Image (spheres, helix red, strand yellow):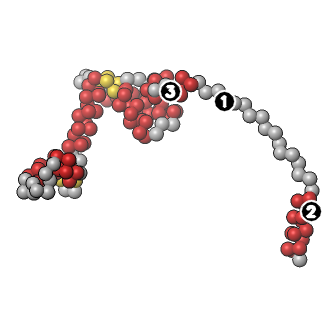
Amino acid sequence: MMSEWFSEFVQTNLIAPQPPPQQVSVVPQVIDPIQLNKPLVDKIRKYGAEEFRATANDDAVRAEFWLENTIRVFDEMSLTPDECIKCVISLLRDTAYNWWKTLKRKEFLELKQGRLSVTEYEREFVRLSQYAREYDSTEATMCKRFI
């Protein structure tokens, strides 16, 4: 009984004239082509991000204020984590930038390969490779094996 009613309902409603689809006017969005190609650093500066130059006499409050302001700008712009890193690095100047480079070098040198740091791994690799010269005859082969 229910399936008969449903079949009849579908047939009746398919025959009934359907109203025309509603017309929606679309306003084209104008995008400034210069804004699209503008480097991200220029955009974050427009939002209020500032360069950070650190000296030995700076206090932690100044650095904290800069960091909070920079994070606020990144949040407003909805930047990805990779974009945030690139932008922060581009805002560091002088001593602050040198600190960043030193920090990344230290992080690289302390990177672990199992129980060994990269430096220790390299030292061990070079030491042991002298006993297997016939397997690693070229520098390219040595690099591949190291990796």
**Amino acid type, callout 3:** Asn
**Measured along the vertical axis of the image, is residue 7 above or below residue 109?**
below
The quarter holding residue 32 reads top right
Pointer 2 residue: 12
How far apart, in angstroms, are the residues tagged by discs 2 and 3? 56 Å
Residue lying furthest bottom: 1
- Is 119 situated left or right of 6 in this image? left
**Category of crowding for the residue at label 2, using alpha-carbon neighbours closer than 10 angstroms: few (below 14), some (14–19), many (at least 20):** few
**Amino acid type, callout 2:** Thr
113 or 95, nearer to the observer: 113
- Name the residue located 31 percent from the left edge and 24 percent from the top edge: 93
Q: At numbered mark 2, what does the secondary structure look like: helix, strand or loop?
A: helix
**Category of crowding for the residue at label 3, using alpha-carbon neighbours closer than 10 angstroms: few (below 14), some (14–19), many (at least 20):** few
On residue 37, the disc is: 3
The quarter holding residue 58 reads top left
Q: Visible in this render: residue 57?
A: yes
How far apart, in angstroms, are the residues tagged by discs 1 and 2? 43 Å
- Name the residue located 43 percent from the left edge and 26 percent from the top edge: 41
